[in-house]
Image (spheres, helix red, strand yellow):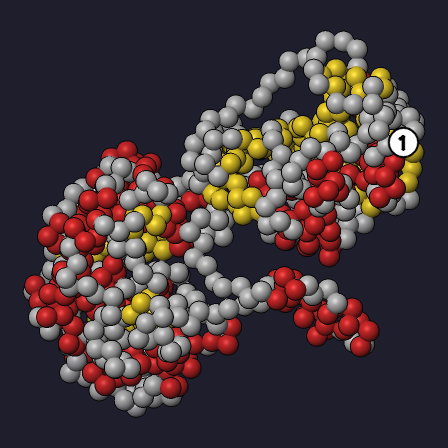
Amino acid sequence: MTHNAVVVGGNRTPFAKAGGPLAQASNHDLLTAALDGLVARYGLAGTRIGEVAAGAVLKHPKDFNLTREAVLSSALDPSTPACDLQQACGTGLEATVYVANKIALGQIDSGIAGGTDSTSDAPITVSDPLRRALLAANAAKTAPQRLKALSRIRPAHLKPQAPSVTEPRTGLSMGEHQALTTERWGISREDQDEIAAASHHKLAAAWDDGFFDDLVTPYLGLARDAILRADTSVEKLAKLRPVFGGPGGTMTAGNSTALSDGAATSLLASEDWAREHHLPVLAKVVDAEVAAVDHPGGDDLLLGPVAAAGRMLARRGLTLDDFALIEIHEAFASTVLTTLEAWKSDEYCRSLGLDGALGTIDRSILNVTGSSLAAGHPFAATGARIVPTLAKLLHQRGPGSKGLISMCAAGGQGVVAILEAV
Amino acid sequence: MAGTEPARTVEHLSESPGMGAAFARALIPRRGDTARIPDRAVTIHGHRQDLARLAEYSRVCEFTLRHSVPATWIHVLTFPLHVHLLSDAESSVPLVGAVHVSNDMTMHRAVGADEALDLTVHLENLRPHRRGALVDLVGQAHADGELVWDGVSTYLSSSVSVPGDPEGRDRTPFEAGTPHGLWRLPADLGRRYRRASKDPNPIHTSRLAAKAFGFPRPIIHGMWTHARALAALEGRLADAFSVHVDFVKPILLPRTVGFTSTATERSLDVAVTSRDGATPFLLMRAKDGSP
């Protein structure tokens, strides 16, 4: 027996740039803040939820049970179980899929999906040789053995290792990868800056309309997304120097997402549970798919979602024309643009084993309340930002309205999902 | 191949010979000699692989530590035998200063880290080159009498000569292009690889020694670059495969280099290049199956 897994709503912290207003908050603090806001909004204090699934991309070893610990810090019933889940930038959406699947199968009747990341409080680790020497010293049975192990430590080993967003197999940062893709697909600087400016303008308009009033709870004195620049323009963005792709590159700090701090959560439930608890029923989770590309073999790192979308649409007998709204995560403005180009390309789609091009879309249905360029992108949180946002937008458009989410992730992966207003 | 070979005398060693003294001997200049190589083969029976060293080798070359060992690891195990033969009184080809120009290896099947290996190396095919002489160091690894790995390392020595006309050599084709991977090779990479490989050649670790051989800075071992390139293809090659590399240019340390791989119908081709993809340092072609 399967059940409708529906999105009840969501809550997130405002997002901020690394080193900004949320710099003092850890992943645990951020996730707890997002959970407590959700609990307050939907009256869940003391309620046992079926399961909470969330994660962080940059995670401290001490946070091995991050989500469960955040649940224990929150106002949820302490008997609420939790699990940590991680799929790079796809984490928040993958957590949604995980919870929705359990609800659909009847294993749980309510669940919370989320994600958090703090690039301000990123884990710093010791170097490999220092770690090996310390482990050997720890395992040593005699003092001379311990001394011998410690004598292998050299001054250079003491340098702390900051985490990097470099793909381990290629040595290229995500921006460097996307710069290759941008060049390969012939994406212009102007088009990228237009996407970036539009993202800020749409997000600012949504804030002004009060759209986020029931999606975001202020935290540590921050009430709005701190990266948002309502007054930016294509002209202002055009003045920025390229940061990826060399001196002739087209990708700037303006049309690439900033390293961010923040957390987001989404409340999901079976339709029956939501109605019994007199909670809103915004949209159901219809389907989802994950795909990956061979970026070590030279494929475009961030085009993983294209095959996922193609296979999912084919399975559902849907085309892009069936969607009222589309959300493409703005890792970079050029990710959005290359995804749109890839959807249009018969040749590329066939190379993925699809029957042909997915088609073109009307840009007016894309990221209508802005996306990651303006809001920021705390890696694991973004999926859990998009899901309730899109569910609310679809609900406003009326029952049956469908929305598509496309998210790229490190490791050449892509997560896509379909929501439909109830 | 074995059937057409002349019978060789075989020198049995009980363990891997140390390489330090051999390298010291090889530093003595022997310019202008007509090349001579020893005729015999050298063998170590029942070599037990050192797991801690294999782990260190895997870390420095970025292989996943698996039960099956990398092909280049078996080359490393045979390398002391190369040095032993080249530092022999019957050899006039000095190892230091000789340039490793190309290498071929075949894995006939997956080799476990716990397998005892019989390692054999001999020299053959001394032939003229326009800049000196080429010689092949031929290695084999047997497990329980079964040939599991063989390798041919071709060295160019410019300090000896062989009469005759140099043969034309086929270069692996190379096309400049933007690399889709970058490797940052740190200054101490030569020292780290030396610990795992035990190759004591000082041009990889000492600026002074590197200068003596005409390099402004130490250069990374060609076999590290080869191993790193093979590690980048892990999971894409069958248990049995053959691989050829050309060491086109040395890589000075530290340096960031580019990596490009191309899958063709018959092979996986790799180029390790300058960062901009214009200058090749190493070209590699790997094919599934043993020939």
Q: Is residue A267 left or right of residue B27?
A: left
Tag 1: Cα neighbours inside 10 Å, few (<14), some, or many (≥20)?
Answer: some
What is the x, y in percent for residue B90? 91, 26
Q: Please report, as a chain letter, where disc 1 is located.
A: B
Q: Amino acid at mark 1?
A: Asp
At x 50%, y 26%, the residue is B174
Residue at left offset 21%, top offset 57%? A327
Task: Residue at 14%, 62% (x, y): give it.
Answer: A231
Q: Position of residue B50 (x, y in %)?
A: 77, 53
Dot 1 corresponds to which residue? B88
Q: Is residue A233 above or below residue A283?
A: above
- Left or right: where A422 falls relative to A111: left
Q: Position of residue A236 (x, y in %)?
A: 19, 53
Residue B56 drawn above or below residue A67: above
Query: Percent position (x, y) of residue B11?
Result: 92, 34
* Residue drawn 75% across the image and 23% down it: B158
When asked about the image quadrant of residue A388, the answer is bottom left
Image quadrant in which the C terminus of chain B is located: top right
Quarter of the image containing the N terminus of chain B? top right
Which secondary structure lies at badge 1? loop
Q: Residue A422 lies in what quarter of the image?
A: bottom left
The outermost residue toward the bottom is A46
Q: Is residue B249 visible?
A: yes
Looking at the image, can residue B35 be seen?
Answer: no
Q: How many marks?
A: 1
Q: Image height check: is B185 above or below A402? A: above
Q: Nearer the viewer, residue B16 or A230?
A: A230
Q: In which quadrant of the rendered view does residue A54 lie?
A: bottom left
